[in-house]
Every structure is written in C-alpha cells, then in structure tokens.
Image (cartoon, grey):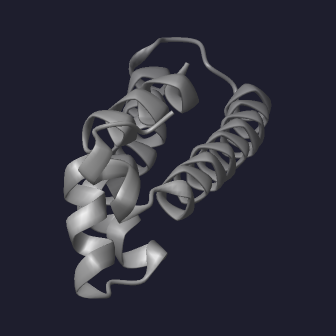
C-alpha cells in the first residue's frame, strides 16, 4: 500500500521533480526532498509506537516482544526498500521534455 501511495505522490509531484532534475539534483536528493523525509519519519515512528503499545498491554512476555521486534523490523526494512526502489525508478524516469508536453506516462 505504501508503495502505491508513494508512486501517486511522485507522479503528482512530477513538475517539482523535473525542475529539481533540470537544476542538477541527484536522484537520491530529489527523493529525500519530495518524499524521503516523510518516509524516514514514518519508518522511525511506526516501530516505536508499536513497541510502546506492546509494553502497555499487560501480560506480554519477552519472547513475544522479541518476535514482534524481529518481524516488525523485517517488514519495515522490506517496505522501506520497496518504496525507495520504486521512488528512485520513477524519479529517474521523469524527463523534462515529458513535463513540457504535460505527460508522465
């Protein structure tokens, strides 16, 4: 779901991406400027919120917390890698000539 939302955000921000590419920004910097900050904040806040909620629930044993942390870490890293990869593919695909024509397809 996050990858799909990210793709729509990047397509909506196509003109901004095109201007940044025209100025000479590298793809990673464009990604960080457009969606990277939001993605990094959500990547950090999500696991922290999950840990806080699991600590508040009574009767949670350490095995459950360890399993939760490992699984959540794996899912978070996989999701982050997928959204970063899709984001960089979309950013590298944008051409200024396409933006002048008004099309990103």
Q: Quadrant of the N terminus?
A: top right
- Total number of numbered labels? 0
Give the quarter of the image for residue 79: top right
Position of residue 26 relative to residue 55, above or below, is below
Q: Where is residue 61 in the image (x, y as percent from the top left)?
A: 69, 25
The foreground one among 78 and 17 is 17
Q: Quadrant of residue 8?
A: top left
Q: Nearer the viewer, residue 25 or 95?
A: 95
Q: Which residue is drawn at 46% across and 13% down?
A: 57
Furthest residue toward front = 101
Residue 20 locus on image (x, y percent):
24, 72
Q: Quick check: 67 left or right of 49?
A: right
> Residue 4: where, in percent of width, then height?
53, 24
* Image position of 22 (left or right of 53): left
| Residue 74 vertical placement versus 12 (above, below) | below
Q: Which of the two residues, 103 or 45, is positioned nearer the viewer here? A: 103
Residue at 62 percent across and 46 percent down: it is: 86
Whether residue 43 appears in this view of the structure is yes
Q: Residue at x 59, y 12 (%)?
A: 59
Q: Is residue 41 visible?
A: no
Q: Where is residue 96 in the image (x, y as percent from the top left)?
A: 34, 63
Q: Which of 81 and 68 is in front in this view?
A: 81
Picture residue at 53% right of the left edge, 50% below the top = 90
């Amino acid at each position: 779901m996050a990858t799909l939302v990210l793709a729509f955000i990047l397509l909506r921000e196509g003109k901004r991406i095109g201007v940044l590419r025209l100025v000479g920004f590298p793809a990673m910097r464009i990604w960080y400027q457009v969606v990277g900050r939001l993605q990094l904040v959500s990547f950090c806040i999500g696991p922290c919120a999950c840990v806080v909620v699991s600590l508040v629930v009574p009767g949670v044993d350490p095995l459950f917390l360890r399993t939760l942390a490992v699984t959540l870490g794996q899912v978070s890293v996989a999701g982050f890698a997928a959204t970063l990869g899709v984001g960089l593919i979309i950013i590298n695909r944008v051409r200024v000539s396409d933006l002048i024509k008004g099309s990103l397809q």
